[in-house]
Amino acid sequence: MLRVGKVDEKQSNLILIPAFGEASIAEVRSVLKEKIKEIRKICDSAYVLRTDSPVWGEIKKLAGFHKIGVVTFEGSGPEALDETVRLFEESSKKNYSVSLYCSPSPHLMYTSLIEDLLLTLRSRKVRRVNLVRTDPGHEIYAEDIVSREIFDIIVVGDDRAKSIFGMTTHVFNTEDFRARSVNRPSEIPKIAMSPRLAKTLVNITSCPPGGLLMDPFCGSGTIIGEAMLMGIDCIGIDIDRRQIRESHRYLEWLRVKYPQVKLGHYRLTVGDARSLEKLIPDQSVDAVVTEPILLPAYDHLPAYSDASRALLRSKGTYQDALHSIGRVLKIGGLAGIVAPEVQTKEGPLRLELESGRNDRLTPILADSGRSYIQLGIQSTRWVKRNLYLFKRV
Ligand SMILES: C[S@@+](CC[C@H](N)C(=O)[O-])C[C@H]1O[C@@H](n2cnc3c(N)ncnc32)[C@H](O)[C@@H]1O
């Protein structure tokens, strides 16, 4: 995350605007760990986090958030805007905006907030101001906050009397991640995971710098690349030699692109994820992050029967790979495996991933109580992604 606003060590009440739903919350839990006192969901698009010690160092490591801000006031009335405007005055910025979340009637609330804000600015005789309107929604995006140097006021609330006011302090670093998704070298046309999602998943599995992370379906190496940028050593495996070459090309490109970063080491091997024990010693890997998918590239909404057959075929590979992952993972290590959910003409169909009795893996339930975390970002037009998390016991 990129810092765009003033931060104070004492601030312990933060507003989180997630990009990947409950996966983003899983990320913040893994990265902040016991520093978290409470995470309160206001609605799907905003959470409030209370911490018991400063977390700014950790906040910078997150990837799964559009914005993070500090709470400036909880409640309503003139004090709410007064306090936020005072912070705006202290900043050197000329542009400001209001981003509204969780309101059932956002248009009405946004309009009345802007009116009150203008009155407050006038009464405090603040002149050097330029309101950047949100168009068409009620939220200013991260890249605008950076490029136009905007002081972004966050208002979260389903009810004016209980609104939470804040200011954005960190935004997602769009520029940096765009360089690794759009400008990366590639010879095989493919569907690669976004580096942003890859980094979020690596964070969720809590692999420490210097630890060893494995992607046994590594494709073009996106997950490995993000882990290496975090100082994690990696093993990438793929059954297709061309994909291994593609990964190699990408990871060497990263080395040239980020000379200032101490990258982790990597090893790439052609091999079958269903028999990892032939390639890697038992209990030698700290974390696994992978996205096999293994479905046809649908160019239309598939029929239930076709999707069901395709999912059944790929489920065998998933389950065999899961068993094999259980052998090579160290005790206590986490495996994050992305599995598809296909939209069909007759409704959605999910690949359900279960650990067997011999897999030495225990599932970690999502906050929702489900066996998987919805990632809220599609793989292709008809395929959604779910994350299954397992711990080696
Ligand atoms: C969806 S792609 C992975 C994409 C990758 N996350 C990326 O961003 O580039 C799945 C990969 O799994 C590989 N694969 C399929 N079956 C495999 C198996 N049994 N063992 C290892 N790799 C396999 C394919 O060759 C393909 O490159």
Image (cartoon, grey):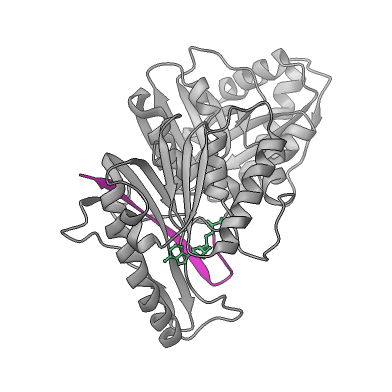
Residues 196 and 21: in front is 196
Side of 332 relative to 154 (left or right) = left
Q: Residue at x 66, y 50 (%)?
A: 249
Between residue 221 and residue 20, name the one nearer to us: 221
The answer to whether residue 139 is visible is: no
Residue 76 locus on image (x, y percent): 53, 28
**Eyeballing the image, is 367 above or below 270?**
above
Using the image as rendered, state which of residue 77 and residue 208 is in the foreground. 208
Q: Which residues are magenta?
A: 377-393
Find out whether residue 79 is within the magenta segment. no
Q: How many marks?
A: 0
Farthest residue, direction front: 278
Q: Residue at x 57, y 55 (%)?
A: 193
x%, y% of residue 368? 32, 51
| One can see residue 221 in this view | yes
Given residues 92 and 207, the one toward you in this image is 207
Q: Is residue 237 above or below residue 203?
A: below
Is residue 385 part of the magenta span, yes or no? Answer: yes
Quadrant where the N terminus sits is: top right
Query: In the rendered view of the protein, which quadrant contains the C terminus?
Result: top left
User: Which residue is drawn at the image coordinates 81% and 24% (left, top)?
Assistant: 129
Q: Is residue 84 above or below residue 316?
A: above
Q: Position of residue 145 (x, y in %)?
A: 72, 34
- Residue 379 location (% of width, % of height): 54, 63
Q: Quadrant of residue 167?
A: top right
Residue at x 17% of width, y 58% of height: 358
